[in-house]
Image: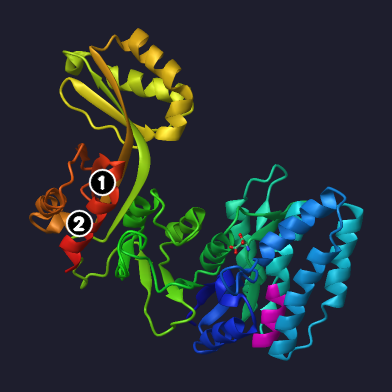
């Protein structure tokens, strides 16, 4: 029987109306057997997320402040959902347990997890599914490390007998039963773990956008959505923040070769973005898949005559950065030159020490620090199969009047990395976007 894991985010489950939409999606395909849910998110822009309220509740209790009002707000949201959906789930006993925790010894992760837990209870009852608590299958060691393989076994153990289950996202438990959450946005990770553990055909991630966008919508008006993207391309795009998914959510399904489908709860007719291990054979990729980028880098440029014969020069240079705990973004090289592109804020903390070490240890002819650099990644498996993609990228940037500081083709051929000045960043991204999308 076909199996789908469908995860719904907080905006998809923010109130009873949204939950009805999610339920219609769940009911539209009996393969959607494993449903992972977030806590109710914002209903309107100024609204509060239930998870934020729960963290506030913990802080108030921990600091011996009055938490009554915050608890009431949370309770009212769940009671509203329950009553509007017309179900009769007992919330009194659930809130009695929460109050007991607050009075006796407030536990941060336990409290934060109650948004997913309670929403899970309500949604399971509404759609007529089993409620399966992740505390018995998503496992962490005593020091909080996620136990990947043990979890994978337990997920199947606990779910194999269920035809239809709702599982709260965001948390699991340590081996002694203490609740432990993932980092914020972590229900995405739960969805991925459940998809892997149940060997689902696809991991659907339902959110409030119709997929990943080709580029940042704050720079380009209404960029088109990406229909197919490989896991590898996604990495290239997401390392600079162009992601709709929690970063750690990719690994479990990627390991199992399960595609992720990003979908829009408010527009289920849209096919969204498929994130796949490999592109379908009959699919002809566009020259580029997407453009990501980030401002605020610093370029440290080092020049030394005959650098090319000095074995280990590059390694020694990079070791200096590593010694200060800094990881570099790019490192283009020439015959007698090497540049290290690094997060500007992090670099500025150790600038004096790093420059001193470079001068002392490497005796370079020139060291220059250039702050205010943006990095743009033009990503696409299609780059390899199309002539002239690079030429078009650079022509479009030149026509926009932007000067390119540095070019790096990445180690694979899937990515062209370009540095420009921060003030030129938006113009460059826009120019590349229009070159490939008009
Ligand atoms: N509710 C949690 C958060 O707001 C987890 C999630 O929604 O993914 O971070």
Q: In the displayed structure, does residue 357 sit left or right of residue 115?
A: left
Residue 382 as seen in the image, left or right of residue 238 = left
Q: Secondary structure at mark 1?
A: helix
| Location of residue 127 by image quarter | bottom right
At x 86%, y 76%, the residue is 92
What residue lies at 71% left-to-right and 80% top-to-bottom?
122
Find the magenta span and give its range.
Answer: 119-127
Is label 1 within 8 A of ligand 1 (CB to nearest ligand atom)? no
Residue underneath mark 1: 424
Separation of residues labelled 1 and 2 (CA atoms): 11 Å
Residue 135 in sight here: no
* Residue 21 % position (x, y): 55, 85
- Front residue of 307/297: it is 297
Q: Quadrant of the C terminus?
A: bottom left
| Residue ID at (24%, 58%) | 430
Q: Nearer the viewer, residue 57 or 233?
A: 57
Is 258 drawn above or below residue 304 in the view shown? below
Residue 65 appears in the rendering: yes
Of residues 64 and 377, the one nearer the viewer is 64
- Residue 314's spot in the image, x, y percent? 29, 22
Q: What secondary structure prevails in the magenta region?
A: helix
User: Residue 2, relative to residue 247: is it above or below?
Assistant: below
The residue indicated by pointer 2 is 431
């Amino acid at each position: 029987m076909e199996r789908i894991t469908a995860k719904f985010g907080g905006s998809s489950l923010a109130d009873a109306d949204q939950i009805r939409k999610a339920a219609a999606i769940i009911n539209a395909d009996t393969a959607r057997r494993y449903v992972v849910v977030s806590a109710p998110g914002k209903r309107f822009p100024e609204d509060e997320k239930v998870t934020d309220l729960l963290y506030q509740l913990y802080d108030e209790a921990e600091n011996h402040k009055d938490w009554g009002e915050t608890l009431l707000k949370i309770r009212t949201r769940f009671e509203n959902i329950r009553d509007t959906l017309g179900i009769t789930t007992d919330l009194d006993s659930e809130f009695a347990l929460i109050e007991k925790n607050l009075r006796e010894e407030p536990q941060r992760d336990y409290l934060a997890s109650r948004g997913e837990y309670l929403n899970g209870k309500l949604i399971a009852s509404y759609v007529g599914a089993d409620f399966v608590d992740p505390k018995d299958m998503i496992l962490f060691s005593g020091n909080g490390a996620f136990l990947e393989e043990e979890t994978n076994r337990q997920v199947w153990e606990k779910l194999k007998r269920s035809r239809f289950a709702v599982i709260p996202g965001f948390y699991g438990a340590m081996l002694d039963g203490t609740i432990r959450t993932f980092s914020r946005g972590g229900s995405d990770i739960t969805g991925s773990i459940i998809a892997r553990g149940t060997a689902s055909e696809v991991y659907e991630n339902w959110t409030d956008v119709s997929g990943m966008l080709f580029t940042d919508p704050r720079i380009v008006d209404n960029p088109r959505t990406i229909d197919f993207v490989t896991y590898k391309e996604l990495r290239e795009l997401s390392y600079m923040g162009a992601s709709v998914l929690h970063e750690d959510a990719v690994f479990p399904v990627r390991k199992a070769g399960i595609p992720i489908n990003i979908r829009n709860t408010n527009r289920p007719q849209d096919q969204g973005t498929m994130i796949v291990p490999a592109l379908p054979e009959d699919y002809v990729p566009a020259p580029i898949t997407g453009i990501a980028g980030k401002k605020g880098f610093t370029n440290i440029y080092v020049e030394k005559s005959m650098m090319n014969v000095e074995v280990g020069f590059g390694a020694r240079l990079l070791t200096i950065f590593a010694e200060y705990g800094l990881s570099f973004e790019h490192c283009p090289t020439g015959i007698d030159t090497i540049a290290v592109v690094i997060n500007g804020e992090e670099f500025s903390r150790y600038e004096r020490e790093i420059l001193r070490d470079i001068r002392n240890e490497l005796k370079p002819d020139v060291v220059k620090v250039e702050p205010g650099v943006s990095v743009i990644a033009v990503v696409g498996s299609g780059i390899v199969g199309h002539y002239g993609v690079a030429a078009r990228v650079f022509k479009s940037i030149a026509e926009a009047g932007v000067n390119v500081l540095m070019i790096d083709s990445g180690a694979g051929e899937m990515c062209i990395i370009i540095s420009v000045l921060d003030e030129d960043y938006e113009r460059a991204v826009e120019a590349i976007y229009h070159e490939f999308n008009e």
